[in-house]
Image (cartoon, grey):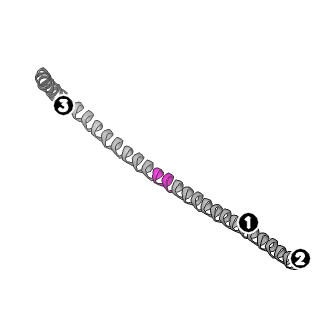
């Protein structure tokens, strides 16, 4: 009987040790999974920050291009107004000629 009790004790100890090992493995796996999720979240946040930074840069560049185009068109309009004011008859003749050319082009 003594041998069977000793064997039973050894088997119980081995079973508890195996169960403890499984629990440790589960905990380690969960810890690794949590770490990967944390890294994923940090990478996603960094990518999102970079995206918004690039969008802000593009927005600023677009606004600058708009201001530049607006200033150039204002300057052209001012120049045209000055030309018409200095030479109204010539401007009317040029407008009439341009209208004729555009009329011919529209008919084709």
For label 2, the SS is loop
**Residue holding disc 1:** 23
Q: Quadrant of the N terminus?
A: bottom right
User: Residue at left 42%, top 50%?
Assistant: 58
**Residue holding disc 3:** 87
Q: Is residue 8 above or below residue 104?
A: below
Q: Are marks 3 and 1 in contact (CB under 8 Å)?
A: no
Image x and y of residue 66, in percent: 38, 43
Q: CA distance from mark 2 to mark 3?
A: 127 Å
Of mark 3 and mark 1, the one earlier in the sequence is 1
Q: Is residue 25 above or below residue 66?
A: below
**Residue holding disc 2:** 1
User: Residue at left 64%, top 65%?
Assistant: 32
Image x and y of residue 51, in percent: 48, 53
Q: Is residue 71 above or below residue 19?
A: above
* Disc nearest the viewer among 2 and 3: 2
- Asked if the stretch drawn in magenta spans residue 5, the answer is no
Q: Quadrant of residue 41?
A: bottom right
Q: CA distance from mark 3 to mark 1?
A: 95 Å
Q: Quadrant of the C terminus?
A: top left
Name the magenta segment's main secondary structure.
helix
Mark 1 surroundings: few (<14), some (14-19) or many (≥20) residues within 10 A: few
Mark 2 surroundings: few (<14), some (14-19) or many (≥20) residues within 10 A: few
- Asked if the stretch drawn in magenta spans residue 53, the answer is yes
The residue range painted magenta reads 50-56
* Disc nearest the viewer among 3 and 1: 1
**Given the current orientation, which residue lies at the most extreme right position?**
1
* Depth check, front residue: 69 or 45: 45
């Amino acid at each position: 009987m003594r041998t069977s009790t000793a064997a039973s004790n050894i088997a119980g100890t081995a079973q508890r040790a195996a169960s403890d090992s499984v629990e440790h493995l589960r905990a380690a796996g969960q810890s690794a999974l949590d770490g990967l999720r944390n890294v994923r979240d940090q990478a996603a946040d960094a990518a999102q920050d970079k995206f918004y930074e690039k969008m802000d840069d593009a927005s600023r560049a677009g606004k600058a291009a708009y201001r530049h185009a607006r200033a150039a068109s204002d300057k052209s309009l001012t120049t045209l107004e000055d030309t018409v004011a200095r030479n109204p008859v010539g401007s009317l003749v040029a407008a009439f000629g341009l209208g004729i050319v555009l009329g011919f082009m529209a008919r084709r």
